[in-house]
Image (tube, rainbow, N blue to C red):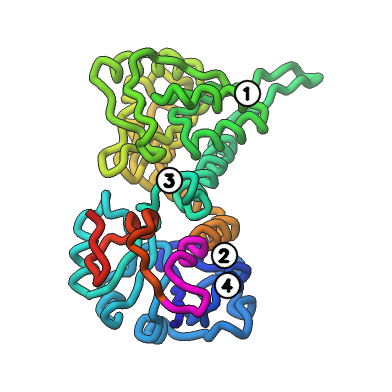
Amino acid sequence: MKLGVLREAQDRRVALVPAALGKLNLPLLLESGAGEAAGFPDTAYGDQTTISSRAEVLTQADLILTIAPLPEADLAQLRPNTVLVALFEPFNQPEIADTLNQHQVRAFSLDMIPRTTLAQSMDVLSSMASIAGYKAALTAASYLPRYFPMMITAAGSIRPAKVVVLGAGVAGLQAIATAKRLGAVVEAFDVRQAAKQEVESLGAKFIEVEGAVDQSDAGGYAVEQSEDFIKRQQAEVQARAGKADVIITTAQVRGRKAPLLLPRATVEQMRPGSVVVDLAASSGGNCELTKDKEQVWHQGVLIIGDSALAASMPQDASTLFSNNAVNFLKLLIDDSGNLTIDMENEIVRSALITTSPESTNP
């Protein structure tokens, strides 16, 4: 069985790094230059690897690991029953399963792996969210026209920046921790009351709004809230926003538009020079003024919409993605290097999104 890894079309990351290859007993077909943008040249992959053209990987590999789904032109070159492992996001792209079935491939979506303790070592979403949260704080600090920490100088004292983080999941917690390390005063809000202890353990103040619908089994995502709660939440956020220098938003509801946390009126209350970093931009944004992959200035406030901040740190992002993916592949490949799809395994069953001889994800 041959493993194939391709160069990502619009991403500097690579799905498999050299250090992780040794954990799999498989020969690798690597598209030439696949890891170069992430700092992993072809020569780093060793003797177990055959440097190939893209066409050779597509037509000869039995299992192909990528970050983004393959385009239609690539799918057309695959042999029937080729196994694909990637971030297919079937909740956001419901047509993807039908497309993959038409090409008679077996596809496993890494974002469908249950976010449980048992699957923690395979949780690509958490790994990428952690990087995104870290980079969100750094991005905000680089654009904010003032210090994050308090500074006492001969020329006078500078107060610390105030950062508000909306959503205290993996990305939010990393943003909190990074902003605190940079010296900011940090407040955070999350609909899950269970997040309070985590927020406070990082030295931030937890913003409480009574009456939230708490769903502990939501897989790390936010859940939809009542209209009354949303109004009270927006009123509380608006009160805090007027005093904030930076707002970082991370809330997403799986398969649905991101909840609106920062309406235009709230942004207009922020001081000129303030910065909003919206990590939910790709699913509609938590800020009313967000435009995905764009920077928007509104009355002196900068709104940065970017859900792909993890890709801006391609070396570490590739390493973490690769480790998560390899831990998942170990469930599909036995010690002899043969494919074994165990549909009794909850992780495997949840990740399979196409019809196959084994089963179909419901």
CB of mark 3 within 8 Å of CB of mark 4? Answer: no
Pointer 3 local density, CA inside 10 Å: few below 14, some 14–19, many at least 20: many
Amino acid at circle 3: Arg
Residue that carries the numbered disc 3 in the rendered image: 115
Report the Cα–Cα distance between label 1 and label 3: 26 Å
Tag shown at residue 203: 1
Question: In the figure, is residue 208 to the left or right of 284?
Answer: right
Q: How far separated are the C-alphas under marks 1 and 4?
A: 39 Å
Query: Which residue sits at x=41%, y=25%?
Result: 192
The correct choice, above or below, for 127 with respect to 64 in the image is: above
Nearest to viewer (mark 1 / mark 4): 4
Count neighbours of disc 1 (C-alpha within 10 A) and say few if under 14, some if 14 to 19, many if 20 or more. Answer: some
Lower position in the chain sequence, tag 2 or tag 1? 2
Q: Residue furthest front?
A: 344
Report the residue marked by disc 2: 38
Q: Earlier in the sequence, mark 3 or mark 2?
A: 2
Q: Residue at x 29, y 83 (%)?
A: 79
Packing grade of label 4 (10 A; few <14, some 14-19, many >=20) is many
Would you say residue 165 is visible in this rendering?
Answer: yes
Which circle's residue, 3 or 4, is located before the other in the chain? 4
Q: Where are the magenta residues, as a range?
A: 325-338
Label 2 and label 4: CA atoms lie apart by 16 Å
